[in-house]
Amino acid sequence: MITLHTINELQTQLTPHQKKEETIGFVPTMGALHEGHIQLVREAKEKCNCVIVSIFVNPTQFNNPDDLKKYPRQLDKDLTLLEKNDCDYVFLPEESEIYPPHLPKISITLGAIGEVMEGQFRPHHFDGVVNVVARLFELIQPTKAFFGRKDFQQVAVVRKMVDELHLPVEIIDSPIVRSESGLALSSRNQRLSEQDKEAAVVISATLKKGLEWAKKYPPIVVLNKMKECFTHPQVKLEYLQIVNPSTLENVNQYWVPGATACIAAYCGEVRLIDNMELTPKGK
Ligand code: AMP
């Protein structure tokens, strides 16, 4: 595995692959890697000639300075894990390389996709995501880029960005990886105590109940039942919505294929998100 720090090093290594028209698979991350990230590396490895993972804790997508300060960082462990999983390149850029002075800011109209849920509760978050992903795509020029469905809305935003900017990259999304208890793996879980982790299971448990109820009841009934059962003294619900996967608008009376329940909740001061598809996409 080759570690790249600068754009120069990056381009020197990637140019020969591009010249040979090899497929480059890209997995953007913020580090503190776990099995959720590794699943993306494996999928990229299967589908591409070479795989590059970036580790960059992007300050512009954090709306909460304390969250940025406390975001887990464990570079040595991450590098060992990536090497073990046959990653070819890891890109560790400095902030000054990603955001040089005078870099034009990308501003695209995301519409409802960018305004609801995470967009509503984390102002400017997707602005930061769009700009960092576009910049990384520009530098790496990947053939395919791999994202986790854990960040369901992020996948929708990135797809919209790729469409709007006509970028020649295929976006591939992968299922959520969970712990045995059902808790979705997340770098932020490192900030949870064992007791917090037990409490946080209410999030995935509520989603699983939603999946069962969706077989019997209309969306609005399921939503209300899920909200009623989301009770835990330690976990505070920020939002719980059932949305259309294409528009991210609320689904109320009738089910649509791929309707997805999305939750954001605080366990102490740690903000967690999770989601589950309640109706099959092809139905
Ligand atoms: P992050 O480092 O949190 O920015 O995540 C990097 C990528 O890994 C994103 O595409 C995430 O959606 C994905 N990811 C994070 N956690 C999981 C998980 N539990 N299952 C699947 N993908 C995940």
Image (spheres, grey):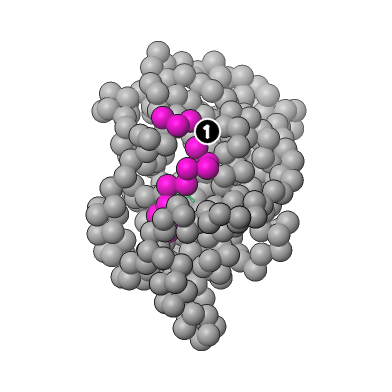
Q: Quadrant of residue 112?
A: top right
Q: Quadrant of residue 204?
A: top left
- Report whether residue 50 is seen: no
x and y, in percent, of residue 102 in the image: 61, 55
Q: For numbered disc 1, what is the local secondary structure?
A: loop
Residue placed furthest toward the front: 101
174 part of magenta stretch: no
The number of numbered discs placed on residues in the rendered structure image is 1
On screen, residue 276 above or below 172: above
**In this orientation, which residue lies closer to the viewer: 171 or 201?**
171
**In this orientation, which residue lies closer to the viewer: 216 or 91?**
91
Residue placed furthest toward the bottom: 20
Query: Is residue 277 toward the left or the right of residue 166 in the image?
Result: left
x and y, in percent, of residue 257 in the image: 68, 44
Q: Residue at x 33, y 40 (%)?
A: 72
Query: Is residue 262 toward the left or the right of residue 254 in the image?
Result: left
Query: Is residue 42 toward the left or the right of residue 238 in the image?
Result: left
Q: Quadrant of the N terminus?
A: bottom left
x and y, in percent, of residue 86 in the image: 32, 68
Callout 1: 10 Å neighbours few (<14), some, many (20+)?
some
Q: Amino acid at mark 1?
A: Asn
Residue under pointer 1: 63
59 part of magenta stretch: yes
Q: Residue at x 50, y 18 (%)?
A: 229
Range drawn in magenta: 54-66
- Report whether residue 24 is seen: yes
x and y, in percent, of residue 187 in the image: 37, 41
Query: Is residue 115 toward the left or the right of residue 82 in the image?
Result: right
Q: Residue at x 37, y 38 (%)?
A: 71
**In this orientation, which residue lies closer to the viewer: 70 or 175?**
70
Q: Residue at x 74, y 32 (%)?
A: 254
On screen, residue 148 above or below 268: below
